[in-house]
Amino acid sequence: MDTSRNWTPNDWIRLVALIGAFGLFGLGAWMLFQGIAAEGMIDLKSSILSGTIKASSAGLYLCFFALFIIAFVLTTLLSLPRSSSTSPASRARRLMPIFWGMLGALVLCAISAAFTPEDARTGLIMLITVLTMAIFPVVIEIVRVISNDA
């Protein structure tokens, strides 16, 4: 019995958005490391998120918005309609704490590297590289499991 299903256009849009958000986060982290500054203020007004962000780092803006996009895409993946039969917690739900933990560690490492002197960043950059490489299989597995469940 083949349990695979064809991907819908929404699935492809989610995948492109997720890949783009990770690329945007990487660009923001690179800008933080290079010290590229852009002073400004962003006024956010939406039903989900509202407030004002004022910073002097363009990279910080990009990282913030990339994390917001990643969270939104993964939230929409988990809210897909389920079958009427009750089942124990799916594998995707068990993988989500791992994903959030790795993503949080990645953000903390990026922020720490931004405030660390340039000659002491090597260890943090290696840790960021390892976390980035390790988070991709987790995201791929979450997407694969969710696409098989639906």
Image (cartoon, grey):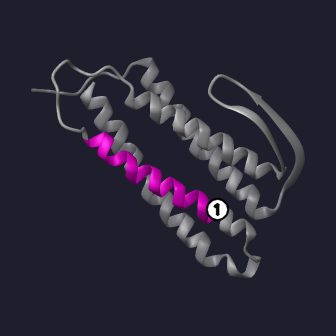
The quarter of the picture where the N terminus appears is: top left
Query: Is 99 a magenta residue?
Result: yes
Please tell me which residue lies in front, 87 or 91: 87
Relative height, residue 9 to residue 21 (above, below):
above
Q: Which residue is mark 1?
A: 110
Name the image quarter holding residue 34: bottom right
101 w.r.t. 1: above or below: below
How many residues crowd mark 1 within 10 Å: few (<14), some (14–19), many (20+)? many
Quarter assignment of residue 81 = top left
Question: Residue shown at 68%/56% (left/top)?
Answer: 29
Q: Residue furthest left?
A: 1
Residue 49 on the magenta segment: no
Q: From which residue to which does the magenta span run?
A: 91-109
Where's residue 98, x and y in %?
Answer: 39, 53
Q: Residue at x 56, y 72 (%)?
A: 126
Image vertical order of residue 91 relative to residue 30, above or below:
above
Residue 103 x, y percent position in the rendering:
51, 53
Single out the residue that lies furthest toward the bottom: 119
Return the residue found at the far right: 39
Dominant secondary structure (helix, strand or loop) of the stretch shown in magenta = helix
Q: How many marks?
A: 1
Secondary structure of residue under mark 1: helix
